[in-house]
Image (cartoon, grey):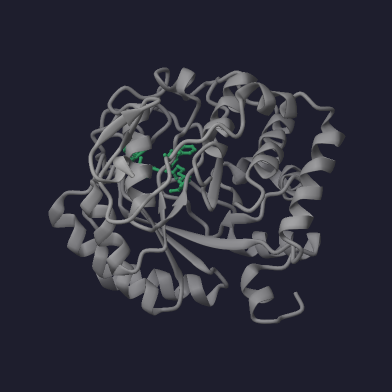
Amino acid sequence: MEQNTETSKQQGVTFHPAPKPVTPIVAETWPVDEVLGLFDLPFNELLFRAQEVHRREFPDGDVELATLLSIKTGGCEEDCGYCPQAARYDTGVEAKKILGITEVLDAARSAKESGATRFCMGAAWRSPKDRDMEKVEEMVRGVKALGLETCATLGMLKEEQAARLKDAGLDYYNHNLDTAPEFYDNVISTRDYQDRLDTLGYVRNAGLKVCCGGIVGMGESRRQRAGLIAQLANLNPYPESVPVNHLVQVEGTPLFGTEELDPLEFVRTIAVARITMPRARVRLSAGRRQMGEPVQAMCFLAGANSIFYGDKLLTTENPEASDDRVLLEKLGLRTRAKVESGGCK
Ligand code: SAM
Ligand code: DTB
Ligand code: SF4
């Protein structure tokens, strides 16, 4: 295949040389109008359809618990309008040095003891420097050796960095499209949409699983929410893991003060993600603390089957782990760890 032997440009997507044949990263499976048609369904009809897909694809109905650790906090040079870690916004987040291996492994061990099956390491970087890579690879090797699935989100990658992470034992790379292409310039100016697609292409080519989602509640229209989901669903193949974040409004960021999204619209977004990406782990991500139990329960009904588990996201609050255990128990939802170990709950 020509696209594997030389860099070429087709339909706005750059293909890069890869050692083995790969398929183009974008397909046209879900036109935006069709995705919008799902959003426009009567609420109960939409949830019914999402439940049908969810039960068919995930008969165990388990919920994955993923614990997040900020391995490098604050001081980021980018201008993402939602982000408390961007150095240019006065949000009270202090820039810190990269964590040491012991601290990371202690956190991973305690995540595992609490029932998490995936451990995600996040860094406030535009992209990792080569000197950072060795440290991150050591972390990945250590976390993997504990028997956890590994995930990292370090910003934009070069092709060889993706391959190095794969060699170290990384399972997933998280890199979000964040929003629809049409809304993107309202949120970020220091990297463009194509940069994100390029990184996702390198991640795929390296044989890593893709964790890719976005944020809703940033002032985008319903059509633009449909545009984000269409972009994700048209990745070829679509991501194995899809974090749907609700904007956490942080004082000092440009998006602070954005009009709040109707919670039912957030539930709709989860349902549409489930229908368009049937086998993906759809993760109810940032913003759960502000949602309360009834909205989260509706999100699980709409097809969410993964959460960030632990009292903190990267810099903002997540529900207490003990409250999450109570909620899952109340809803009769089993964790993936319990299902895989043959436990009854
Ligand atoms: N610096 C890397 C990057 O941007 O790719 C990795 C870390 S970054 C914090 C990971 C993702 O967190 C962002 O792409 C965004 O989707 C999400 N995020 C950041 N701040 C958020 C906020 N205030 N509310 C909701 N999601 C947020
Ligand atoms: C993702 O999509 N959401 C997570 C994870 N990937 C890295 C991050 C949410 C960050 C929320 C804001 C904060 O805590 O700083
Ligand atoms: Fe930096 Fe990532 Fe925050 Fe953007 S989202 S400012 S790249 S840490």
Residue furthest left as drawn: 131
Is residue 108 shown above or below 213? below
- Which residue is depicted at the point 39% across and 18% down? 185
Residue 35 in percent (x, y) is at 67, 28
Q: In the figure, residue 172 lies in which quadrant?
A: bottom left
Ligand 2 rendered quadrant: top left
Where the C terminus falls, by quadrant? bottom right
Who is closer to the viewer here, 330 or 41?
41
Q: Quadrant of the N terminus?
A: top left
Image position, residue 290 (x, y; %): 62, 40
Q: Position of residue 284 (x, y in %)?
A: 61, 47
Q: How many callouts does the rendering have?
A: 0
Query: Is residue 325 or residue 162 the one in the foreground?
Result: 162
Q: Is residue 92 visible?
A: no
At 36% from the left edge and 64% from the top edge, which residue is drawn? 170
Please indicate, yes or no, whether residue 226 appears anywhere in the rendered image. yes
Q: Quadrant of residue 58?
A: bottom right
Residue 282 lies, in percent from the top left, at: 61, 49
**Residue at the location (53% across, 53% down)?**
240
Tell me the quarter of the picture where residue 253 sits. Answer: top left
Q: Residue furthest bottom?
A: 342
Name the residue nearer the viewer: 262 or 276: 276
In the picture, measured across the screen, residue 278 lies left or right of residue 45, that is left
From this view, report whether residue 337 is shown above or below residue 3.
below
